[in-house]
Image (spheres, helix red, strand yellow):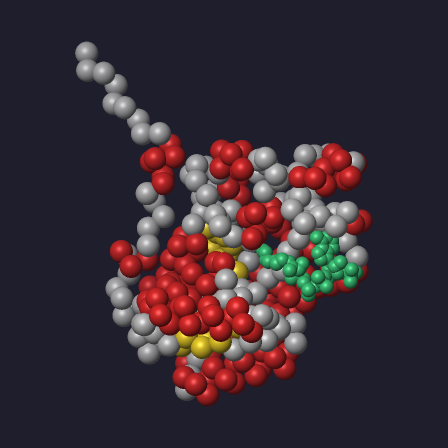
Amino acid sequence: MAPPPQLPEPAEAFAARAVPSSTTFKPNILAGKVVFCTGGGSGICYRIVEVLLAHGATAAIMGRKADRLSAAAKQLSESTRRKCIATPGDVRKYDDVEKAVDATVKEFGRLDMVVCGAAGNFLAPIEGISPNGFKTVQEIDLLGTYHTVKATLEHLKRSHGSYVHISATLHYTAIPWQAAPSAAKAGVDALSNSIAVEFGPFGIRSNCIAPGMIQGTEGADRLTPKGAEDLVVSRIPTQRMGQKDDIANAALFLFSDAGNYINGTQIVVDGGAKHFPGPWLPYPDSSLDKQGVKELVMGSKL
Ligand code: COA
């Protein structure tokens, strides 16, 4: 009898599946289009912008730290040979966002795609977060998204453009010490749906991407309890961490003509993790003995 076929190790089977967008999409599908991205100076949003540039777009990125942002814009221009400018500012301040959007349209003459990606997060229990701490997360994530939408709508009406908001899966259940970002991202989802309905008749689409654990990001580092790195991967059905390319591919698809009937939805890119509880902070210890678990958290102020 023939021996049973050898199954690949799960990690091997899935490791190859984070494909670069260049192997899937034509290189010119965004030719002539302009993207404005908040939070584009680092992390997931940096990679999204890089991929959009590599498919023919030009770009402006917005972030708080002017030096870091200029360096990122330069690096993006060099890696893609497409123009990317830095438009520094704080999404919490409407005037900053309006100025950044004006500078983008002055530079490129139009605006087609907007990525609302600026976010702030830290792990803290409801009792351990100050009113200002809670407010800060809402102001960056939710108010910042509203500011960006408000400042770009007229331009997107003209171009029949599209929004992609970077949301999360946190609020689909409830995760200890994540009340502030959960509330903020639930608001982002709701805002995106409202934009889809109110501005669909103007030819504008609005969607969210909800990333899972994405390797090499501050978000994943902060959310992973110390010592639980292997456990994190074992709880992800695809048995691998997400890559920034996984999220960039989803954004590229949504912005492309192939996505033009997708409006008012949340695309979850998490390897199936939302269906399975993650290795979050020990429960109920994280509620009953906060001091006892604070060592597991990066940057805890408890
Ligand atoms: N636990 C509890 N409260 C915290 C905290 C933590 N780990 N980190 C910040 N806060 C509180 C501060 O104490 C402050 O409240 P207070 O005035 O009552 O003391 C409030 O949040 C604002 O903090 P501050 O550092 O002054 O604000 P900031 O505008 O400089 O930065 C963040 C705010 C959220 C951006 C900051 O925490 C940060 O840099 N986070 C890392 C970057 C990040 O979040 N990336 C995204 C990952 S998904």
Is 136 positioned to the left or the right of 272 in the image?
Answer: right
For ligand 1, give the image quadrant: bottom right
* Residue 259 rendering spot, x and y as whole percentages: 37, 63
Please tell me in which quadrant of the rendered image residue 239 appears.
Answer: top left
Please tell me in which quadrant of the rendered image residue 231 appears.
Answer: top right
* Residue 191 rendering spot, x and y as whole percentages: 59, 66
Frontmost residue, 3 versus 231: 231
* Residue 159 rendering spot, x and y as whole percentages: 41, 81
The answer to whether residue 70 of the structure is visible from this angle is: yes
For the N terminus, give its image quadrant: top left
Residue lying farthest to the top in this orientation:
1
Q: Residue at x 32, y 72 (%)?
A: 81
Residue lying farthest to the left in this orientation:
1
Badge count? 0
Q: Residue at x 25, y 23 (%)?
A: 5
Q: Is residue 253 above or below residue 163?
A: above
Q: Residue at x 66, y 39 (%)?
A: 296
The answer to whether residue 57 of the structure is visible from this angle is: no
Q: Residue at x 70, y 34 (%)?
A: 283
Frontmost residue, 251 versus 257: 251
* Residue 56 rendering spot, x and y as whole percentages: 31, 72
Is 250 positioned to the left or the right of 281 in the image?
Answer: left
Q: Is residue 201 above or below residue 279?
A: below
Frontmost residue, 158 versus 134: 134
